[in-house]
Image (cartoon, rainbow, N blue to C red):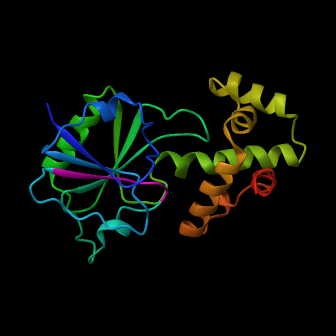
């Protein structure tokens, strides 16, 4: 079993203060977990640890580690617990690795989260990782279809649920969990990639404006 210690920089995006994961931490562990890290903070690699885990938001791990000619990578690994809007975080952890990340560090990181009853997916270092890059254009398309009068919100949601087997349609899901957060994530990915699918839909822009 991989032991882990926790270094708190600020409020964690992945774990609430009473989360059992925090209670499982020990001192002088083989894996060091940094929570609440800001994008302008640099987390140094702990050479005594097998793995140094850095909690990410939308940004790349390279923001924290630096990059060198495509050969970057040490025992620092990024991670983010998938969360949609204001919902409770899911049990999916996206691990972010770089080209030269040691296999031992990846296995240690995976072990920490699997033993905490979480599912783990490993990806390379891209803003938004896997899920946000795939889902945000889908959500924006659904919101634009509603604006264009393709169908009512109820019919759009029903079509997705019955046709694709999703438990909830995109319109009701976004309105329930937070259109403003969807705006923020889409806008960040638009700045990173410049792709039209990431342009926040009108309804997300309105929700963000009303939040201020």
Query: In this view of the protein, which residue sits in the foreground, 15 or 120?
Result: 15
In the visual, does 160 lie left or right of 125?
Answer: right
Query: In this view of the protein, which residue sits in the foreground, 150 or 103?
Result: 103
Q: Is residue 45 above or below residue 33?
A: below
> What residue is shown at x 69% (from left), y 42% (from top)?
178
Residue 2 position, x and y percent, is: 15, 36
Query: Magenta residues: mostly which secondary structure?
Result: strand
Quadrant occupied by the N terminus: top left
- Farthest-out residue, left: 48
Residue 88 position, x and y percent, is: 54, 32
- Farthest-out residue, bottom: 69
In the visual, does 12 lie left or right of 146?
Answer: left
**Residue 44 colored in magenta in the image:** no
In the visual, does 170 lie left or right of 3?
Answer: right
Magenta region: which residues?
A: 51-58
> What residue is shown at x 11% (from left), y 60% (from top)?
47
> What residue is shown at x 18% (from left), y 42% (from top)?
108
Residue 59 position, x and y percent, is: 46, 61
- Farthest-out residue, right: 149
In the visual, does 178 lie left or right of 70?
Answer: right
> What residue is shown at x 83% (from left), y 28% (from top)?
154
Residue 145 position, x and y percent, is: 81, 45
Query: In this view of the protein, which residue sits in the foreground, 186 or 39?
Result: 39
**Residue 53 colored in magenta in the image:** yes
Q: Is residue 184 above or below residue 69?
A: above
Q: Is residue 139 above or below residue 111?
A: below
Quadrant occupied by the C terminus: bottom right
Q: Quadrant of residue 171?
A: top right
Q: Quadrant of residue 71?
A: bottom left
């Amino acid at each position: 079993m991989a032991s882990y210690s926790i270094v708190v920089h600020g409020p964690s995006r992945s774990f609430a203060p009473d989360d059992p994961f925090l209670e499982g931490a020990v001192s002088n562990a083989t894996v060091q977990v940094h929570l609440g890290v800001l994008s302008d903070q640099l987390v140094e690699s702990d050479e005594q640890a097998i793995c140094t885990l850095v909690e990410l938001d939308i940004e790349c791990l390279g923001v924290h580690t630096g990059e060198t000619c495509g050969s970057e990578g040490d025992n620092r690994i990024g991670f983010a617990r998938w969360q949609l809007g204001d919902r409770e975080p899911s049990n999916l952890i996206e691990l972010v690795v770089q080209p030269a990340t040691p296999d031992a560090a990846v296995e240690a990181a995976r072990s920490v989260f699997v033993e905490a009853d979480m599912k783990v997916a490993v990806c390379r270092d891209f803003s938004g990782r896997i899920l946000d890059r795939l889902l945000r254009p889908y959500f924006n398309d659904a919101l634009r279809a509603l604006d264009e009068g393709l169908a009512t919100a109820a019919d759009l949601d029903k079509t997705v649920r019955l046709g694709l087997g999703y438990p909830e349609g995109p319109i009701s899901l976004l309105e329930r969990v937070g259109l403003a957060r969807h705006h923020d994530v889409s806008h960040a990915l638009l700045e990173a990639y410049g792709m039209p699918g990431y342009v926040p839909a009108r309804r997300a822009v309105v929700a963000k404006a009303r939040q201020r």
